[in-house]
Image: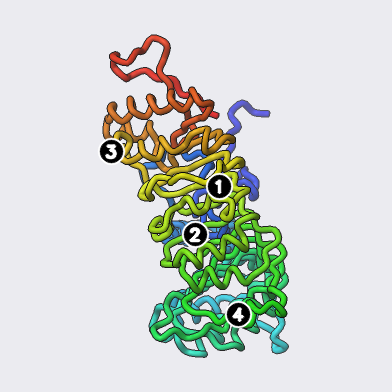
Amino acid sequence: MSINSRTTHADLAIEIWLEIFRYATYVPAALDLTPIDAFIPQQPSNNALGPNTYVLSMRTKYDLILVCRAWRQVTMQLLYEYIPIKSPRRADLILRAFQESRPIPVTGEPVVESYGKWTRHIQIQTFAKGSRSIEYLQKVFLICQHCPSARMLSGVWQWALPQSFHDAISRLYGASLQGLLWDETGHTSPPTPSFATPRFFEAFRSLRVLHMNLYAADISKFTQPSEPRPVLPQVEHIVLSANNPTLLFAAALHLPMLSRATLVYGDADPATAQNFLRVHGPRITYLDLSQSIHAYMYGISQFLKPDGCPNLLDFVYNVQALPMGPLSQPHTSLRRIGLRGIDYRMIRGSVKSHFRSFNRDVFPALEVVRTVGFLLSQTLRAYSSYDAQDEFIRWVEQFERDGIDLQDGEGVIWLRSEDDDETSEPTRFQRWAL
């Protein structure tokens, strides 16, 4: 072989190019509706351009397609993996692209050879003018017919959908859909009962993750003792708005595989929240209340009581919450606690009251306390806040005496070097990554 031979980009296998392009256009929530685990260690952003957004990712895909035929062949599948349908005009363009790539048969059966064969996530919105028409829903359904391999479906609805649309979607994706986001917050007052009954959701037998945000729902039929509860046998993670209709609706479902729950903004009353916990609380091992601000109005301690989530292993909540109140008995299974919403100014203030409530008397199995989203190294670079650093390390040492690891968002335990003392300049520290 000649010593002057060189390897060029043209020598790379097509599979390698695909992975490079996938990395360059990656957006976390584009292909998966499962929320990111709060305890996955975070990394400081060293990218001067910042993280990808949906718009930037799509522009990059368009640019890659225009480079050459080989790159176009690779990138086309990335372009159609995630399909946002935000307006009737967008629906027309997407449907035309699918039909021109391979027209749908007269029989109406799904087409597997159009561009839709690459689609994994379909997002539908009804904010634009004309989205209220039945013609828009018909085009949306035609697009769905071109996407038999779709595994995630997101819908944000500003008006009550006809029963026929629910029936058509459940028939098309009932056996294959793995993630479903159903948001009906746009309903106006007075509430219009949704056709999205528990039986509608029961049709999706392969669901792993379910997002629900309902404005109004009639579940009276499904709360009768003689009526069997609808079953979603594979759902492991639910993401719910903490409002009365959504929590009541979720309580009417039987979720035998449920283990993870995330509650977001809502105004549910304590009795409704307690009813939800009575039904599903014993199965929940991971609970994230980070964005459920209203839940803090009636205290977060109720989630840790025996009639709340007695088998909880991981608990994440926002530092804006009141510190945990006294529990009637210790929570014996909780292993990890995550605190969101911390900045360097809180370390010497409101955070301390939360830290004091994490002790062995209340949580005998506690192993880790993590400041989710707060990275000490990033704080030092941005603000040079050595007071916050000193205070954080003092709490690390205090937790260490109880056998508990206090970690920042990177999953790092910060300790002083052996040649440092309390009065020395806080410039040298050890970082132990777990």
Name the residue tied to disc 3.
345
Mark 3 neighbour class, 10 Å CA radius: few under 14, some 14 to 19, many 20 or more: few
Question: Is label 1 or label 4 in front?
Answer: 4
SS for tag 3?
helix
Return the disc, 3 or 4, that comes first in the chain's sequence. 4
Task: List x then y, in percent, for residue 194.
Answer: 53, 83
Residue 20: assigned label: 1
Q: Could you say which disc has been placed on residue 197 in the image?
A: 4
Q: Nearer the viewer, mark 1 or mark 3?
A: 3
Determine whether the residue tagged by mark 1 lies in a helix, strand or loop: helix
As rendered, which of 94 and 365 lies closer to the eye? 365
**Distance Cα–Cα, label 2 vs label 4:** 20 Å
First-in-chain label (1 vs 4): 1
Residue 263 is tagged as: 2
Give the amino acid at mark 1: Ile
* Image: 50 above or below 377: below
- Mark earlier in primary sequence (1, 2): 1
Q: Position of residue 88 (x, y in %)?
A: 46, 82
Q: Residue at x 47, y 86 (%)?
A: 192
Choose mark 1 or mark 2, whichever is in front.
Answer: 2
Q: CA distance from mark 2 to mark 3?
A: 27 Å
Q: Residue at x 53, y 68 (%)?
A: 247
Residue 204 sits above or below residue 52 on the image? below
Residues at circles 2 and 3 in contact by the CB criterion of under 8 Å? no
Q: CA distance from mark 1 to mark 3?
A: 40 Å
